[in-house]
Image: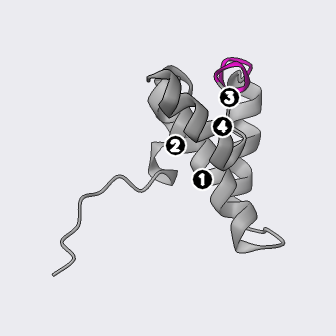
Amino acid sequence: MSKSNNDELEAINGITPAGLAAFDEASIKVLANRLEEDDYPTPFAGLNDWHLLRALAIHRPELTQPYLHLVDQEPFDED
């Protein structure tokens, strides 16, 4: 990811390369459990977790393999 893309991702979601690097199996499991339970105070809180999981799936795919079902990556036709 280019520096400008990293800056854009951080500005939008507070997601940083250092933050992504800090995730381990235990912390990704906590994130995935929150997404599966879908019990957020606002829709935006859930969306922020989804963006974080998506960023992890891109940058740390080895951690997210068991949780890819939570990241909607299915192509769809808008017609």
The answer to the question of whether label 1 and label 4 lie on touching residues, with beta carbons closer than 8 A, is no
Magenta stretch contains residue 59 = no
The reply to whether residue 64 is visible in this rendering is: no
Quadrant holding the C terminus: bottom left
Res. 26 image quadrant: top right
Give the foreground label among 2 and 3: 3
Measured as percent of width and height from the top left, residue 73 is found at 35, 52
Q: Which residue corresponds to the image point at 55% horizontal and 29% vertical from the top-left?
A: 6
Residues at badges 1 and 2 in contact (C-beta under 8 Å)?
yes
Which sits in the foreground, 21 or 5? 5
**Front: mark 1 or 4:** 4
Is there a contact, CB below 8 Å, between mark 2 and mark 4? no
Residue 50: x %, y % from top left:
60, 53
* Residue 10 marker: 4
CA distance for labels 1 and 2: 6 Å
| Residue at the spot of label 1 | 50
Reading the chain from its start, which is encountered first: label 2 or label 4? 4
Q: Report the Cα–Cα distance between label 1 and label 3.
A: 15 Å
Looking at the rendered structure, the kind of residue marked 1 is: Trp
Residue reaching furthest to the bottom: 79
Tell me if label 3 and label 4 are in contact, CB under 8 Å: yes
Disc marking residue 54: 2
Give the alpha-carbon distance from disc 3 to disc 4, as whole Å.
Answer: 5 Å
